[in-house]
Amino acid sequence: MRAALAEAHAALDTGDVPIGAVVVDGSGAVLGRGRNVREAQHDPTGHAEVVALREAARARGAWRLDGCTLVVTLEPCTMCAGASVLSRVDRVVFGAHDDKAGAVGSLWDVVRDRRLNHRPEVVSGVLAQESRVLLEEFFRGHR
């Protein structure tokens, strides 16, 4: 989660919402890193999770990321929760809950929907306070 938080801090340099993500393999090696790049790249899909999953898939040479964990500072939205299911990660670990758009238990629960063919394990609340404070400070300056 510390690596994901470092990515979130780096997003501040481009004016993006400070959300960071990493994908780690079973040994803990980082395969992919991502931060929000929606503003920097004018990309509506430029969420930290998508960026990290894409990089991990390129590093692995395959789209299936079984045996991997997606670690993200904020609970994934529906798009990112869906991407985690489709990438076949074993686990999604996140920091702060997102009561407005979270799709891993808060508003929706995409990753544990029994109708889907893959359901990653979910671990929440990891360094949640650090993640929440970073977001609160960012939005305080933008409102």
Image (tube, rainbow, N blue to C red):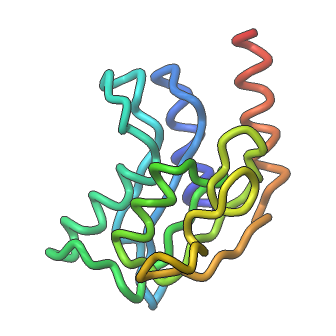
Examine the rendering and report whether any part of residue 73 can be seen.
no
Q: Position of residue 110 (x, y in %)?
A: 56, 63
Query: In percent of the image, x 74 and y 68: which residue is there?
Result: 124
Residue projecting furthest to the top: 143
Which residue is more in the foreground, 59 or 103? 103
Examine the rendering and report whether any part of residue 83 can be seen.
yes
For the C terminus, the image quarter is: top right
- Asked whether, in this view, residue 87 is left or right of residue 95, the answer is left
Which residue is more in the foreground, 60 or 29? 60
Please identify the quarter of the rendering in which residue 82 is found.
Answer: bottom left
Decide: is 120 above or below 43: below
- Asked whether, in this view, residue 106 is left or right of residue 67, the answer is right
Residue projecting furthest to the left: 61
Decide: is 128 above or below 67: above
Q: Position of residue 55 (x, y in %)?
A: 28, 59
Query: In percent of the image, x 50 and y 77: which residue is there?
Result: 115
Q: Position of residue 91 (x, y in %)?
A: 54, 79
For the N terminus, the image quarter is: bottom right
Query: In percent of the image, x 27 and y 78: which residue is there?
Result: 64
Query: In percent of the image, x 80 and y 30: which residue is there?
Result: 136
Q: Position of residue 133 (x, y in %)?
A: 82, 39
- Asked whether, in this view, residue 131 is left or right of residue 63, the answer is right
